[in-house]
Amino acid sequence: MSSASSNSNFFLFSVDLEDVRDFIPDGKQYKDAVSTNTIKYLDWLDKVNAKATFFVVGKVGRDYPDLIREIIKRGHETASHTDTHLHLTKQTEDEFRRDCESFLNTMTNLGATYIKGFRAPTFSMVEQSKWAYKVLHEFGFTYSSSVLPSTNPIFGWPEFKGEGYYDGIYELPMNIGSWPFKVPFGGGVYFRFFPTFILKQLFRSTFQNNKPVLSYLHPYDVDTEQERFMHPHLNDSKALNWLMYVNRGEVFERMEYLIKNLDASIVRYDEYLKPKLQNP
């Protein structure tokens, strides 16, 4: 299960470290569980002897400095999820430059001296915001995992040309299942909603094609005690909001089942990409 394994079934497990309460009206009236749930991930990763990547929102770093230090202490990669989780499509180039600068200053002050990765909030790296690659390159980033190469109710880039360099940044897009739906099956609500036997098929077919499975989860994805409220970016859909709470108690069990039965290795994004980035 560790990243030291010699097999090539790579599971690029990651956490998008954000506080969902920041994105809803009067969100701070609800219970603070960011640290508690993030520690669950850290302890589970220790249990399976693996290191992962945490895409951190800068504001979370300022609100929970000890949590960021703990992530670094345990040997995990920290990467950018922007400074305040503002979609790229809502920023100008200069605003994004200020965002990158603020994020990097925050993380440097917390001891994160090696920041090379980036993930756009809600996969908002699309055709109209691809200018962001140039800005990321200016600030010394080397890779991004910000594109959802399919149609999606929120953000998607179905015409995306595929993994590779874009204005000096290596983009590793989310992999999309061809069955039963063209969605990023390894992350978030999709990972929690699909039956395990479907996930196993999707993971296996990805590995057979010599591709890693990319994943993204959030602190709330394992929060079985979170109060009920309408999550952001769902257009107030009660059906979609119901999905936000489905199977939260099964996340770790599902991951353990998949990595055990498919002989998969959890690795940090930067470690997986190291040979690719050495040969641009």
Image (cartoon, rainbow, N blue to C red):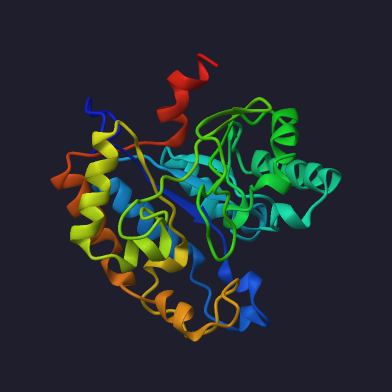
Camera-nearest residue between 144 and 2: 144
Q: Please give the name of the residue rendered at 27% of the width and 28% of the height, measured from the top-left corner.
A: 4
* Residue 126 locus on image (x, y percent): 65, 48
Horizontal arrangement in the rendering, residue 22 relative to residue 203 (left or right): right
Camera-nearest residue between 5 and 178: 178
Q: Is residue 17 visible?
A: yes
Quadrant occupied by the N terminus: top left
Query: Is 211 located above or below residue 107 in the figure?
Result: above
Judged from this view, the residue extending furthest toward the top is 279
Q: Please give the name of the residue rendered at 68% of the width and 42% of the height, measured from the top-left corner.
A: 109
Query: Is 168 located above or below residue 45 in the figure?
Result: above
Q: Is residue 106 visible?
A: no
Quadrant of the rendered structure where residue 187 is? bottom left
Quadrant of the rendered structure where residue 266 is? top left
* Residue 43 locus on image (x, y percent): 33, 53
* Residue 193 locus on image (x, y percent): 32, 68
* Residue 221 locus on image (x, y percent): 41, 66
Q: Please give the name of the residue rendered at 53% of the width and 84% of the height, measured from the top-left corner.
A: 229
Query: Is 263 located above or below residue 35 in the figure?
Result: above
